[in-house]
Image: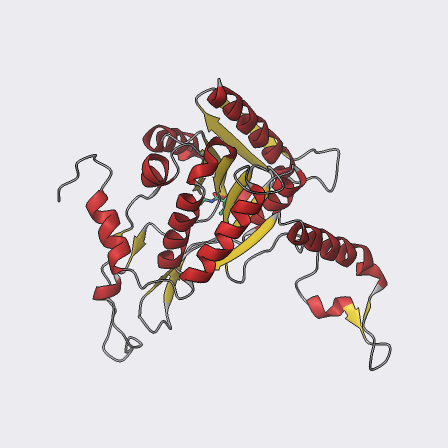
């Protein structure tokens, strides 16, 4: 296969050409353009930095009329918590998230059983139980403020096909925002997939013995994002490993290979307590504040990333 730049153009093009098209592409583009216009210096009332936070895991369908799929682990907690922190830091956030995963501003609400938060004193009123009043009030107020001030645009995906098409749409829409845009790629993205055309249409039959599936490699889109789609954007990728011995080495390799500005390295079992920000200026361990019980690692992580982004913007304009 010929690749002039070595980035695998042929593989990337054939991935997109053979993907089932997004059902609501026009609506997504229209929402994206309106959001970017409102928040960017080009035409909007406000001038904000814009970050695309990706969150949750992509699925790989095994059938076109999908009953079975392969999933990538991610609760979406990192993306949701990071989104809240970016909004707090003054950013407008495009939250590209896996349907059904953790959402910004509802992390502190009980999800099981969520309906226990509420009661009906009579037929026309609904009340929040005293123990959850503060959490529900804050969640509703913060979410409504973020949306009303056009600081939060939520775009859902499920499959690897949807995710990569939407990421490309967002990146190309953000191209003119240049260094004031950021990609914070916390989603867990499938490395392997079943090409749409070689996928069976109907549910795979279970009566004919063991199932052999051949998975193709998902083309590496990060190089494309950095080189073609949004080359001036500040770009943070993530590396998850379960073996702590190889984590930093893998993150360092990814930093060099994809030329991102930093790689956030985390290990599955400790990801909520500690991450390592790997960049050309050295490795920084980021933890939550042990003396503040409500502190989360994203509070300090986003502070550091925002700081690095400010330096990047300054250096870019000199
Ligand atoms: O979503 P979550 O809070 O359960 O976990 C976050 C995470 C581990 C998915 C994220 O920090 C991450 O590392 N994402 C990239 C995963 C990857 O290497 O593909």
Judge from the rendering whether residue 9 lies leftward or rightward of residue 69; answer left or right: left
Specify whether residue 136 is in view: yes
The answer to which image quadrant residue 3 occupies is top left
From the top left corner, tell me how far across and down residue 203 is, in percent: 31, 76
From the top left corner, tell me how far across and down residue 142 is, in percent: 71, 51
The answer to which of 26 and 170 lies nearer the viewer is: 26
From the top left corner, tell me how far across and down residue 114 is, in percent: 69, 66
The answer to which of 273 and 181 lies nearer the viewer is: 181
The residue drawn where x is 72% and y is 55% is 139
The residue drawn where x is 53% and y is 21% is 314
The residue drawn where x is 49% and y is 37% is 182
The residue drawn where x is 42% and y is 56% is 58
Farthest residue, direction bottom? 123
Q: Quadrant of the N terminus?
A: top left
Farthest residue, direction left? 1
Judge from the rendering whether residue 168 lies leftward or rightward of residue 1; answer left or right: right
Specify whether residue 243 is in view: no
The answer to which of 121 and 34 lies nearer the viewer is: 34
- Image position of 154 with respect to 259: above or below: below
From the top left corner, tell me how far across and down residue 225 is, in percent: 36, 40
């Amino acid at each position: 296969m010929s690749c002039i730049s070595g980035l695998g153009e042929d593989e990337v093009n054939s991935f997109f050409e053979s993907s089932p098209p997004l059902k609501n592409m026009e609506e997504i583009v229209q929402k994206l353009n309106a959001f970017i216009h409102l928040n960017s210096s080009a035409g909007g009332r406000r001038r904000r930095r814009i970050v695309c936070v990706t969150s949750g895991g992509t699925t790989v369908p095994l059938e076109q009329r999908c009953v079975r799929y392969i999933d990538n682990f991610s609760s979406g907690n990192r993306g949701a918590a990071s989104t809240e922190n970016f909004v707090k830091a003054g950013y407008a956030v495009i939250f590209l998230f896996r349907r059904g995963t953790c959402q910004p501003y509802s992390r502190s609400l009980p999800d099981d059983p969520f309906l226990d938060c509420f009661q009906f004193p009579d037929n026309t009123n609904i009340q929040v139980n005293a123990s959850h009043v503060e959490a529900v009030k804050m969640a509703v107020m913060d979410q409504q403020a973020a949306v009303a001030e056009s600081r939060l645009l939520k775009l859902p995906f499920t499959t690897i096909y949807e995710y990569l098409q939407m990421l490309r749409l967002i990146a190309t829409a953000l191209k003119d925002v240049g260094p004031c845009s950021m990609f914070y790629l916390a989603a867990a993205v499938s490395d392997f997939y079943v090409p749409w055309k070689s996928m069976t249409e109907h549910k795979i039959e279970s009566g004919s013995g063991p199932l052999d599936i051949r998975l193709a490699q998902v083309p590496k889109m990060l190089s494309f994002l950095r080189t073609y789609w949004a080359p001036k954007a500040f770009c943070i990728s993530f590396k998850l490993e379960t073996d702590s011995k190889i984590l930093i080495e893998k993150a360092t390799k990814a930093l060099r290979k994809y030329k991102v500005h930093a790689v956030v390295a985390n290990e599955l079992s400790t990801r909520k307590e500690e991450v390592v920000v790997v960049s050309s200026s050295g490795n920084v361990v980021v933890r939550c504040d042990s003396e503040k019980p409500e502190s989360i690692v994203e509070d300090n992580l986003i502070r550091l990333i925002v700081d690095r982004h400010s330096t990047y913007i300054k250096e870019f304009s000199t």
